[in-house]
Image: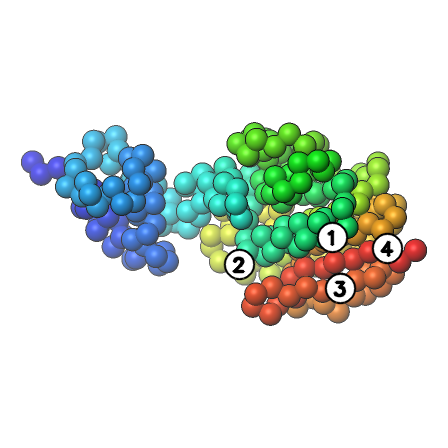
C-alpha cells in the first residue's frame, strides 16, 4: 500500500484549502506541515518523498479542517511575528495587525524624543506593545493591564520568551477602575469595532476574542472613558497614543475636544492613530 508523502500532503492539502477559499493555500499547508513535522519549509521539499506516520497524517487532517473552517493560521501555528519579537498566540488574544505595529513604533519614537519612563498599556492582550517597548527601553517602568486573565497569561509567557523584566502585568477593567498613578505615556488598542460592523466581519475574525474587538455598542465606549480619566492619569507633559477605527475622525475630535490632539495615518492613508496631550 502506497504511503502518503510530504509532497502528497502539500498537493492534496493545497487543493482542499483552495476549495474552501483560503488565501495562499499552498503556503498555509507548508507552514502547518512544517509545524507538524518540526521541519523548515525548505526541508519539506528536500524530503518531499518522505512518508508520514499515521499520527502525523491525522494531526495534519485536523489542522487542515480547522483552517478550512476559517480558524486563523496564527492560532494553528500558535505564533506570530510582531516587529522584532516573536509572540505565542491563542484565541484568548487578538492577532496583532500592522496598525498595532505602527502604534508601537510611534510610541517608541515618542519615548526617545521625550525620555518618558512610566508607561501604561491598556488592554495589553498578547503583550505585544508592552513587550516591544520593554525591549527598546529596559529602564522604563511599564504596567500592562487587561481584564481577561487568560490574555494576561499569554502576555506573561511572551514577556518571558522575550526575556524582559520591566513589565508588571495586572488584571483590571479600565471601564470600571481608574489608574491609581500618573504615567508619562498611555498606549492602547481598545475594542473599537461597532456591534453593527462586528456582525458583518470576515469569518476568520469570529475566531478572535469578541470582547477585544467590539464594545458591543458604537465602537467609541473606550475613547469616552479615556477622555474622562486621562487628565488624572497622565503626568505633566505626558501623552497618549491610541489605535483608532477608520473613518471616525469627527467623532473622535468631539470626544477629545478638551485635549490637544493629532491624527496619524497608516501606510494606506487611513487615520489610525491618535496622539494626544492634556492641555492644562
Q: Is residue 221 among what the camera can see?
A: no
**Horizontal relation, residue 110 to residue 161: left or right:** right
| Mark number displayed over residue 113 | 1
Say whether residue 241 is visible.
Answer: yes
Of labels 3 and 2, earlier in sequence is: 2
- The residue where tag 3 is placed is 262
Where is residue 219 shown, x and y percent of the image? 69, 57
- Secondary structure at badge 3 equals strand
Mark 4 crowd level (few <14, some 14–19, many ≥20, 10 Å Cα): many
The disc placed on residue 278 is 4
Q: Residue reaching furthest right?
A: 280
Q: CA distance from mark 4 to mark 3?
A: 12 Å
Q: Quadrant of the C terminus?
A: bottom right
Q: Earlier in the sequence, mark 1 or mark 2?
A: 1
Residue at image location 51% in from the left, 50% down from the top: 206
Marks 1 and 2 sit apart, C-alpha to C-alpha, by 38 Å
In this rendering, is residue 141 above or below 276?
Answer: above
What residue does disc 2 label? 201
Q: Nearer the viewer, mark 1 or mark 2?
A: 1
Q: Are marks 4 and 3 in contact (CB under 8 Å)?
A: no
Amino acid at each position: 500500500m502506497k504511503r502518503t508523502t510530504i509532497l502528497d500532503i502539500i498537493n492534496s492539502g493545497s487543493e482542499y484549502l483552495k476549495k474552501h477559499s483560503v488565501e495562499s493555500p499552498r503556503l498555509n499547508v507548508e507552514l502547518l506541515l512544517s509545524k507538524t513535522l518540526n521541519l523548515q519549509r525548505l526541508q519539506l521539499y528536500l524530503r518531499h518523498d518522505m512518508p508520514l506516520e499515521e499520527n502525523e497524517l491525522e494531526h495534519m487532517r485536523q489542522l487542515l479542517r480547522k483552517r478550512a473552517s476559517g480558524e486563523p493560521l496564527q492560532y494553528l501555528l500558535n505564533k506570530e511575528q510582531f516587529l522584532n519579537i516573536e509572540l505565542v498566540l491563542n484565541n484568548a488574544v487578538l492577532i496583532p495587525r500592522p496598525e498595532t505595529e505602527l502604534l508601537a513604533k510611534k510610541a517608541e519614537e515618542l519615548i526617545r524624543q521625550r525620555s518618558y519612563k512610566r508607561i501604561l498599556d491598556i488592554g495589553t492582550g498578547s503583550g505585544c506593545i508592552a513587550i516591544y517597548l520593554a525591549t527598546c527601553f529596559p529602564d522604563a517602568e511599564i504596567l500592562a493591564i487587561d481584564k481577561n486573565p487568560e490574555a494576561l497569561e499569554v502576555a506573561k509567557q511572551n514577556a518571558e520568551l522575550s526575556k524582559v523584566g520591566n513589565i508588571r502585568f495586572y488584571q483590571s477593567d479600565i471601564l470600571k477602575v481608574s489608574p491609581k498613578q500618573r504615567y508619562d505615556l498611555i498606549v492602547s488598542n481598545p475594542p473599537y469595532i461597532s456591534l453593527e460592523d462586528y456582525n458583518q466581519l470576515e469569518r476568520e475574525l469570529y475566531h478572535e476574542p469578541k470582547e477585544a474587538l467590539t464594545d458591543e455598542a458604537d465602537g467609541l465606549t473606550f475613547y469616552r472613558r479615556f477622555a474622562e480619566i486621562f487628565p488624572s492619569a497622565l503626568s505633566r507633559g505626558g501623552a497618549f497614543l491610541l489605535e483608532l477605527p477608520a473613518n471616525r475622525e469627527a467623532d473622535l475630535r468631539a470626544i477629545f475636544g478638551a485635549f490637544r490632539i493629532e491624527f496619524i495615518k497608516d501606510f494606506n492613508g487611513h487615520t489610525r492613530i491618535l496622539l494626544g496631550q492634556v492641555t492644562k
